[in-house]
Amino acid sequence: MQPCRILIVEDESLVAMDMERMLTDLGYELIPNVNSYTAAIEVLDKTKPDLVLLDITLNDTKTGIDLSHLLQQQYKVPFIYVTSHSDKKTIDQALVTKPNGYLLKPFDANDLYTAIEVALSNFSGQTVNGHDDDAMLCKDALFIKNDKNFVRVDIDDIQWIESEHNYLYIISQKGKHIIRSNFRDFQQHVSAARFIQVHKSYMINLNKVDAFSHTDITINGKEIPLSRMYKDDFFACMKRIL
């Protein structure tokens, strides 16, 4: 799995450097940070981060709040306000933009990690079932946008699903597809008796299991890890269908 790619938009260089250090230690991938609205737009036009850490006060005539509108409407990227402002006026202005998080300075690595993971989880939940018009879940099939067309992927053909940040990689007998969603919301639209999560990054179709042990599951030659947290549920499900 690729690490989450984060863009820092912060006009205080020392704060930006401190965040870079914490994010690197936490295993995230960094896009070179910027300190203004204009510079942020230049970066966003060239690359799409998984998340933006956004200061409200920027080295520009426009603020982080101004940038937040573009992040939502044009770039469709989740963002967390990172600010020292905790007054009611600023918070009220920020809340109108519906940020995915609000982190007050100073903070430590644990605070930063928690804010990021909660923001990513909430954002993926908001985008299920075609929020970006990239997929539609029906009773027996998933229609996934490919260029201008929606390609049918039969639910019965799905072998396993891999989660990465805001996205699900759907592995079917006919190929690999990607949608913006998460396990929880996907499972609400398919049979819970058929699909089960077996690892923080994997969900499988129980009908496609070729072999399994106490540590992994094999589907079509792919070894999928079985974590301790999900092992009991998996074995219980397999007993029901065997």
Image: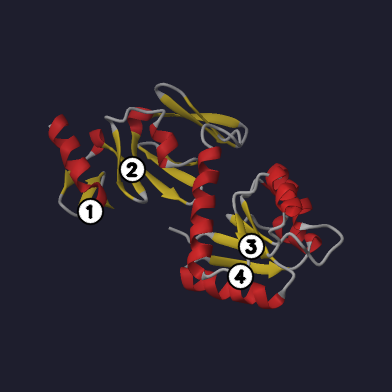
The amino acid sitting under disc 2 is Met
**In the drawing, does residue 169 fall left or right of residue 238?**
right
Reading the image, the residue beneath label 2 is 203
Q: From this viewpoint, is residue 210 visible?
A: no
| Residue 156 occupies quadrant | top left
Q: CA distance from mark 3 to mark 2?
A: 29 Å
CB of mark 1 within 8 Å of CB of mark 4?
no
The residue most toward the top is: 139
Reading the image, the residue beneath label 4 is 106
Q: Position of residue 71 (x, y in %)?
A: 70, 49
The amino acid sitting under disc 3 is Leu
Mark found first going from the N terminus, 2 or 4:
4
Front residue (pair 71, 89): 89
Residue pictured at 66% horizontal, 44% vertical: 98
CB of mark 4 within 8 Å of CB of mark 3?
no
Q: CA distance from mark 1 to mark 2?
A: 14 Å
